[in-house]
Structure formats: C-alpha cells, structure tokens
Image (cartoon, rainbow, N blue to C red):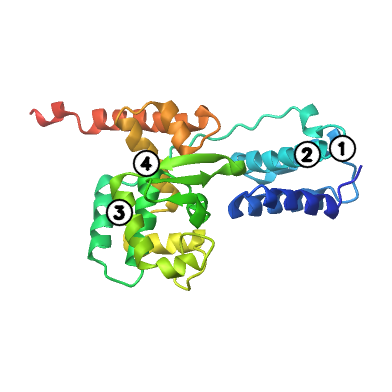
Amino acid sequence: MQLTLEHLSFYLNQCENKRLSWHTLKAYRIDLKQFYSFMMNKDMNKREISYYIHYLNHHFKPKTVKRKLASLHAFFEDMVFYEIIQENPMDKIRYKIQEEKTLPRIIQYHQLQDLFHRLDQDQHFFIKRDKAVIELLISTGIRVSELCAIKNEDIYLEEKYLIIYGKNAKERVIFLGEEVYLALKEYEQAFHDRISEQEYFFINNQYHRLTDQSVRHIINRYTDDFHITPHMFRHTFATMLLEQDVDISYIQKILGHSSITTTSIYAYASIQRQKEIMMNKNPRQLIK
C-alpha cells in the first residue's frame, strides 16, 4: 500500500477534532509531510520504513528523531483504528534511539527577583497581562503552548483552578496559588470586554489570541540582559519543587508527564546542583 495525501489530510483533521495544541498539530504536519516525501511511490512496508528511520538517524538529533517516529507511530495507530490498514508497521520494526542526556536549564533565583522587580516597575498598557502570563508560567510549570491554548471556558478564577489540555489532548486540573490568582484576576478585570470577545483567555497587543512567539516577546521585554525562554520557567518550577522535597510523582502529575522517567531528569538536575554546592560553596572553604 502506498501513502497518499488523502491519508494525511484525514488523519490531521482527526487530530484537530481531538483538540490537540497548535504546536502539536504543526509538528505532526511537518513530520508526516516529510515522511510522505520520502515514501513517494514506495510501498509502506517494513523495509522502506526501516530505510526512513536510517535516514532520520543520519540527518537529525536523537530527540528530533524520537519525536518524528512518535508522530509516525500515532499516525499508523489511527489508520489501524479506522481500518485503512490491518496493522501498525512500526510494531514490527526494532529500533533504539539513544537520546543524549542534557540537564534542564533553570532560571537563577536572582534573575527571578530581577524579573519580578521589573514587572512591578513597568506601567505600560499590557503590564497586567504580562504579569499574569509570567506568574502562570512560574507558578504552575505549564507549557507555553498550553498557556496560549487556555480558553475562557477552561478557567475558573473564583474556584482558583483551570483546565489544561496537554500533549495528545490529555486533560489535567491545575490549582492556582494566591499570587497567580490575583495576577489573573487583575488581568481579567482590566481586559474583560476584549477577553469576552475572544475564544481564548490571553490576548496579544492586537487583541487576538496570544501565540508562543508573543510570549517570548513578553519575556524578552523584562530580561534583555539575560536569556530566558518560556520552557525554562517549567524547568525552574519542577526543580524548585524537588528542592522543597515534593514527591516526584506529584510533580509528574502537575507537569502532565505520561512517564515518570521524563520527570526524573529534574531529580538528576537537583543532585547535580547539590554536588555543585558541596564542591564550590562548602562552608569548610571559609575556614582558613
């Protein structure tokens, strides 16, 4: 059987119906179009797909290969479900992706202090939105794509919780602490009319849906002398919870990780931090 554009269109339409994030849909679209180009006029069999995996391993980093193969596996599973094919050809292929271990980059405490000090000093028109965005990132550890996808119907301010739809449209409840609740409340009150006109809770400077890139611009406004990405808030949130002895299984649920293996990278990072402190800031070094 050969892959057709109709197969891809059907699958991507199904993904949109599952309320997957814009970021996830974009990744699926890129990955599957690349697979389609490689498989042009070829049969979807074990040998050809193995060649494709070989191609990926020689042209992309392990993390990217892993994502592309996950996209492919999900596509085939859907085709099996709708009886377009009899079985998932990926199930018959053995492969192992040795992903390089990189420690998550976190925001230093003094940088967070500086960031919030600048937020308190700024008086521009959208400052309440900016505060709400940054408070939500550092107080909940949600992904930037999840933040941008929050709809008005997903947020329950008076009850102090919101509904997040993570990867693969997995739903989870996020409870709000006092600081982030107040920031969201002030933003909602300041832009109530504009927000009510939109489907999504966060708006950009043109009063449309906030995007990943818009969030990066917001962060850059207050961190021009040190580099911070939206995902670093997630890393920092998880690491700080671990350093306060929060059980890793709770952190896994809050972050929306399907496997605790993913969350365990923060435990490793915390151990490395302890080692750094003992090596470089040991009180014994002060005794001369």
Does residue 226 appear anywhere in the picture? no
In space, the residues marked 4 and 2 are separated at their CA atoms by: 35 Å
> Which residue, given by chain and number where applicable, does mark 1 sit on?
85
Q: Position of residue 106 (x, y in %)?
A: 37, 44
Marks 1,2: beta carbons within 8 A: yes
In space, the residues marked 1 and 2 are separated at their CA atoms by: 8 Å
Q: Residue furthest front?
A: 158
The disc placed on residue 182 is: 3
Q: Position of residue 20 (x, y in %)?
A: 62, 49
Type of amino acid at the residue the image marks with label 3:
Leu
Q: Sequence-wise, which precedes: disc 3 or disc 4?
A: 3
- Identified at 82% across, 33% down, the residue is 89
- Identified at 78% across, 39% down, the residue is 76
Does residue 83 appear to the left or right of 204 in the view shown? right
Does residue 89 appear to the left or right of 248 in the view shown? right
> Which residue, given by chain and number where applicable, does mark 4 sit on?
237
Type of amino acid at the residue the image marks with label 4:
Phe
- Identified at 25% across, 32% down, the residue is 277
Marks 1,4: beta carbons within 8 A: no
Q: Sequence-wise, which precedes: disc 1 or disc 4?
A: 1
Type of amino acid at the residue the image marks with label 2:
Phe
> Which residue, given by chain and number where applicable, does mark 2 sit on?
76
**Label 3 Cα crowd, 10 Å radius (few <14 / some 14-19 / many 20+):** some
